[in-house]
Image (tube, rainbow, N blue to C red):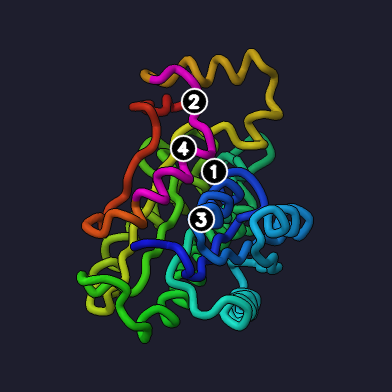
Amino acid sequence: MDVAGHAALVTGGGSGMGAETARALAQAGARVAVLDVNMDGASEIAAETGGIALECDVADGPSGEAAVAAAREAHGPARILVNCAGVGTPGRIVSRTGPLPLEDYVRVVNINLVGTFNLMRLAAAGMTGLDPVNESGERGVIINTASVAAYDGQVGQPAYASSKGGVVALTLPAARELAQFGVRVLTIAPGLVETPMLRALPPEIQKSLGDSVPFPRRLARPDEFSRLVMHIIDNTILNGETIRMDGAVRLAPR
């Protein structure tokens, strides 16, 4: 799909991989709506890309519905959704203080998995009735963000790993269901990415993390994520797959 002139939604677009994705889409000519709970970051990226910033709690049904409706009113129905919103709050199942508070687990799953599904269902509902944009009959594409933790979850990551595992498991059934409408669904599973959270770590820890990657021996960059997003959008045969973006890293138990 050629993104030029089409509307796009990017959740978590106020920072990190979401911000780079918003920039790449806008540079290619898309009309971008930046959805985030952090309105300062979203507004900054929207101003930079000529898009709009919309406050959105992806885990909340009415909040998602309002954001998608506002984006549609401003830009028309979206043909592209990139779900980047997520949290990685750590916590052991049982720690020295006792069992992990259930609300901590639920919060991570709600944002990472339920939030992904929430925006998927809303964006897909708008895509299915659109006219095809190419000879393949394509109407839209949805790209979700998982993590290598879905496969290599570490100690202290039960909520994060299981939420991202759910995103991986959602990919194929969603792609199969939406295929009849010409809507593709894919997921990217990044490894160790140079996000604001990792950049806040001491340089020696950042280097140690980068050195754990077989090749290239460094952290991935957010723009490498956005370049993969753009390739997925362009390459219509890609569908129903989760693509690891990790330099062949496999996370150790700890």
The residue shown at (68%, 25%) is 201
Residue receiving disc 2: 254
Which region shows up in magenta? 216-231
Q: Earlier in the sequence, mark 3 or mark 2?
A: 3
Residue receiving disc 3: 25
The picture places residue 222, in percent across and down from the top left corner, at 54, 39
The picture places residue 137, in percent across and down from the top left corner, at 24, 74
**Residue 36 versus residue 100 in the image, above or below:** below
Residue receiving disc 1: 93
Any magenta on residue 224? yes
Q: Picture quarter containing residue 26?
A: bottom right
Count neighbours of disc 2 (C-alpha within 10 A) and say few if under 14, some if 14 to 19, many if 20 or more: few
Depth check, mark 2 against mark 1: the one in front is 2
Measured in 3D between alpha carbons, the distance from the residue under mark 2 to the one under mark 1, in whole angstroms, is: 14 Å
The residue shown at (66%, 16%) is 203
Residue receiving disc 4: 224
Local SS, label 1: loop
Measured in 3D between alpha carbons, the distance from the residue under mark 4 to the one under mark 3, in whole angstroms, is: 13 Å
Depth check, mark 2 against mark 4: the one in front is 4
The picture places residue 100, in percent across and down from the top left corner, at 61, 47
The residue shown at (43%, 71%) is 79
Placement of the N terminus among the 4 image quadrants: bottom left
Judged by its main secondary structure, the magenta piece is helix
Instruction: Give the residue type at disc 3.
Output: Leu
Looking at the picture, tell me which residue is in the foreground, 94 or 227: 227
The picture places residue 209, in percent across and down from the top left corner, at 53, 21
Depth check, mark 3 against mark 2: the one in front is 3
Instruction: Give the residue type at disc 1.
Output: Ile
Local SS, label 4: helix
Instruction: Give the residue type at disc 4.
Output: Glu
